[in-house]
Amino acid sequence: MVVKAKVGRRRYVAFEVLAGSGEVTRGRLVKAIGARADETGQKNLPEVILIENGRGIVRTNQRSLRETTDMLNSFKGDPSGIRLRTLQTSGTIKTLKEKLFARTRIKQ
């Protein structure tokens, strides 16, 4: 038996915080995700991996990918005040970081 068959494949979803959300911290987002999951009955909660400069990454499994992206995109005009938009999905954090969190270098 392959390990992935037991654990499942992980997927990483990148998102951006839209204007009007104020300061979105990891703790604030975790609370909002938990509250939304209680409302919708979602059992597999995504885990917040990174929030930096108005963008972030959450981890989920392949089976819950659609639910997770729908949940993140539904954060618009809700009581938490957080507004998000998903950007990209990947099988590795490295790919998302390279594409979306690349730091610009100044040539001298």
Image (spheres, grey):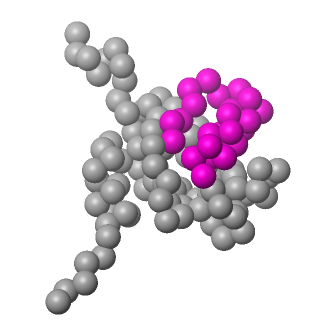
- In-image side of 19 versus 2 (left or right): right
Compared to residue 8, the image places residue 53 above or below, namely below
Residue farthest toward the bottom in the current orientation of the protein: 108
Residue farthest toward the right in the current orientation of the protein: 79
Residue sitting nearer the eye, 72 or 105: 105
- In-image side of 102 versus 18 (left or right): left
Q: Which residues are magenta?
A: 25-48
Q: Position of residue 55 (x, y in %)?
A: 50, 60
- On whether residue 43 falls in the magenta region, the answer is yes
Q: Quadrant of residue 59?
A: top left
Q: Position of residue 67 (x, y in %)?
A: 58, 37
Is residue 87 shown to the viewer in this render?
A: no
Kindly identify the residue that appears in the image at 32 percent across and 70 percent down: 103
Kindly identify the residue that appears in the image at 17 percent across and 89 percent down: 108
Q: Quadrant of the N terminus?
A: top left
- In-image side of 106 versus 15 (left or right): left
- In-image side of 39 versus 86 (left or right): right
Q: Quadrant of residue 19?
A: bottom right
Residue sitting nearer the eye, 7 or 35: 35
Residue farthest toward the top in the current orientation of the protein: 1
Residue sitting nearer the eye, 53 or 99: 53
